[in-house]
């Protein structure tokens, strides 16, 4: 596996890291198999979050038999106060089952007032620094989807790493955020490399190889099967960027996603009616793009609050950073996913 440096921290990181969301779906035994397979294939960067239910526990349980210095543990929290952050870091340590977490990130910072709150006296930065003093955490980072805000955050100098989405359809980071991070010598962690599942299995390889050409530290696809681990890690070994013809193919596919494409950032939530908007768009993507109508209709049956519950209040649209016409899209998705009458 190719390694790169995690910015000013200088830590060698495998170019393919482990995104900790999908292991939530695996039972404990399978999760351990998948995580250990990743470690054995050369992955040394494992990213989780307080919000990912039992992901930290599964990662900790899987890696406990390996020498601690051979892997980097990263997690993150939505806490914005000093007290809250310290308490969250304590829980992450307990869940991972380690004394020290390598990288702790301020999770999904999206509004200027949120950043201000984190940095203010009594804010989450204070709590995270206290955790550093106690030896609970080695370095601090920030994560988010709103590139303008992250650009402001990176120049504060408080963060060693920045985690942001990057893929062929969500590439706003390339123009200013990535250069700004490089100027600050920050580690760069790419989330959503497969556009939150929009690139199905047939496009995963090209989508990851597309990213290998960028000067980022580590790309963290979520993985929930040993086969996925093997396929992704092979790309990290070969590190073969796309040739121009392959890139054209990927761009042509990206075009088919069109303007009405949900990036699954979840900013639109909560919906007052309890609709899981990105989940419904994900299922609709399978229905409309991957020829999986029956499968999607079947999965939709288990979705607690259906698209039909939408009262068209429009609150979600005010919050969507991509200006998606959510009301129109959710109505259409509901029609598709109801299945044949
Ligand atoms: S418009 Fe519909 S989906 Fe959006 S917040 Fe209102 S009820 Fe929820
Ligand atoms: S609808 Fe918009 S805000 Fe909601 S998850 Fe999709 S892209 Fe994000």
Image (spheres, rainbow, N blue to C red):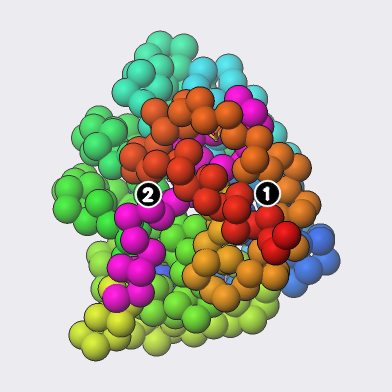
Real-space CA distance between mark 2 and mark 1, rounded to the nearest whole angstrom: 20 Å
Residue 300 % position (x, y):
71, 55
Determine the residue positioned at 60% across, 25% down: 272
Examine the image and state in which quarter residue 240 appears: bottom left
Q: Does mark 1 have its CB less than 8 Å from ligand 2?
A: no
Residue 328 % position (x, y):
46, 43
Locate the C terminus by quadrant.
Answer: bottom right
Determine the residue positioned at 81% across, 60% down: 28
Q: 310 and 168: which one is in front?
A: 310
Q: Residue furthest front?
A: 341
Task: Give the extent of the magenta segment.
Answer: 252-277
Examine the image and state in which quarter residue 235 appears: bottom left
Residue 274 forms part of the magenta stretch: yes
Question: Residue 56: which numbered mark, if any?
Answer: 1
Q: 234 and 174: which one is in front?
A: 174
Q: Residue furthest top?
A: 121
Vertical comparison of 86 with 35: above or below: above
Examine the image and state in which quarter residue 338 appears: bottom right
Q: 322 and 48: which one is in front?
A: 322
User: Residue under circle 2?
Assistant: 164
Residue 309 forms part of the magenta stretch: no
């Amino acid at each position: 596996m190719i390694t790169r440096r995690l910015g000013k921290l200088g830590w060698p990181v495998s170019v393919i890291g482990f995104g900790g969301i999908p292991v939530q779906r695996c039972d404990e035994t399978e999760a351990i198999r998948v995580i250990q397979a990743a470690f054995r294939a050369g992955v040394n960067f494992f990213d989780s979050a307080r919000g990912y239910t039992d992901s930290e526990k599964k990662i900790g349980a899987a890696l406990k038999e390996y020498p601690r210095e051979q892997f980097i543990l990263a997690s993150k929290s939505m806490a914005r106060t000093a007290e809250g952050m310290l308490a969250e870091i304590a829980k992450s340590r307990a869940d991972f089952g380690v004394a020290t977490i390598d990288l702790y990130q301020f999770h999904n910072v999206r509004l200027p007032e949120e950043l201000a709150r984190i940095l203010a006296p009594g804010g989450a930065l204070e709590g995270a620094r206290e955790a550093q003093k106690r030896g609970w955490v080695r370095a601090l980072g920030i994560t988010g989807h709103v590139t303008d805000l992250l650009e402001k955050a990176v120049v504060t100098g408080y963060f060693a790493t920045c985690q942001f989405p990057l893929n062929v359809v969500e590439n706003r980071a390339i123009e200013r955020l990535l250069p700004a991070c490089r100027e600050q010598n920050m580690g760069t962690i790419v989330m959503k490399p497969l556009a939150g599942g929009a690139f199905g299995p047939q496009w995963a390889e090209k989508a990851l190889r597309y990213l290998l050409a960028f000067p980022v530290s580590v790309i963290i696809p979520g993985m929930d099967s040993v086969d996925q681990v093997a396929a992704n890690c092979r790309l990290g070994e070969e590190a073969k960027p796309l040739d121009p013809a392959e890139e054209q193919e990927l761009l042509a596919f990206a075009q088919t996603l069109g303007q009405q494409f949900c990036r699954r950032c979840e900013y639109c939530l909560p919906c007052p009616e309890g609709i899981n908007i990105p989940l419904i768009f994900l299922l609709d993507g399978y229905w409309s793009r991957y020829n999986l109508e029956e499968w999607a209709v079947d999965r939709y049956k288990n979705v607690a609050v259906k698209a039909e519950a939408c009262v068209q209040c429009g609150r979600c649209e005010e919050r969507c950073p991509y200006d998606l016409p959510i009301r129109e899209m959710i109505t259409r998705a509901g029609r598709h996913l109801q299945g044949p009458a």
